[in-house]
Amino acid sequence: MHMFGYYRPPHPGTTASPGAERAQSKADSVEQRLDRALVTMEAMWTLLRERLQLTDEELARRVVEVDESDGILDGKVRRPPKACPHCGKTIPGRFLRCLYCGEVVAPEPFA
Ligand SMILES: [Zn+2]
């Protein structure tokens, strides 16, 4: 039974199914990549802070400004839907390829 994120196999000694093991392996990989990205981001920030004499308060204010750029202060920046340049149909903003015609939609950095 799942409770507060803790998983216990239904019977003692039962091993996870191959599908569950793959999902766990993928989750571990994503967590490792996220950890690496966070370390890199912190390294970049400390380098910028030193070189440009910025402050943590300036970073905190900018984080709020970026977060609010989609109109909602929620720790995320939602990408608005966009029109496919080939077929013109509307696709989710986070998609890099049109769902309808397969056209690659040029990613806009931070847009
Ligand atoms: Zn399209």
Image: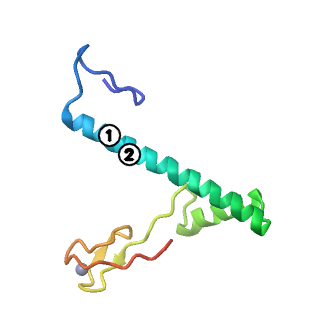
Secondary element under disc 1, as helix, strand or loop, is helix
Q: Residues within 10 Å of mark 1 (few under 14, many from 20)?
A: few
Q: Amino acid at mark 2?
A: Ser
Closer-to-camera residue (95/25): 25
Residue 59: name its quadrant.
bottom right
Q: Position of residue 13 (x, y in %)?
A: 24, 15
Is 12 situated above or below 76?
Answer: above
- The residue pinned by badge 2 equals 29
Q: Residue at x 37, y 73 (%)?
A: 81
Q: Residue at x 42, y 71 (%)?
A: 80
Residue 75 is labelled as none
Q: Residue at x 74, y 62 (%)?
A: 49
User: Going by the image, does 49 lie left or right of 90?
Assistant: right
Q: Residue at x 23, y 15 (%)?
A: 11
Closer-to-camera residue (53/73): 53
- The residue pinned by badge 1 equals 25
Closer-to-camera residue (101/45): 45
* Gap in angstroms between the C-alphas marked 2 and 1: 6 Å
Is 45 situated above or below 9?
Answer: below
Residue 91: name its quadrant.
bottom left
Q: Position of residue 83 (x, y in %)?
A: 33, 80
User: Going by the image, does 82 lie left or right of 10?
Assistant: right
Q: Quadrant of ligand 1?
A: bottom left
Can you tell me whether the CB of the residue at mark 2 lies under 8 Å from the nearest atom of ligand 1? no
Closer-to-camera residue (38/47): 47
Q: Quadrant of the N terminus?
A: top left
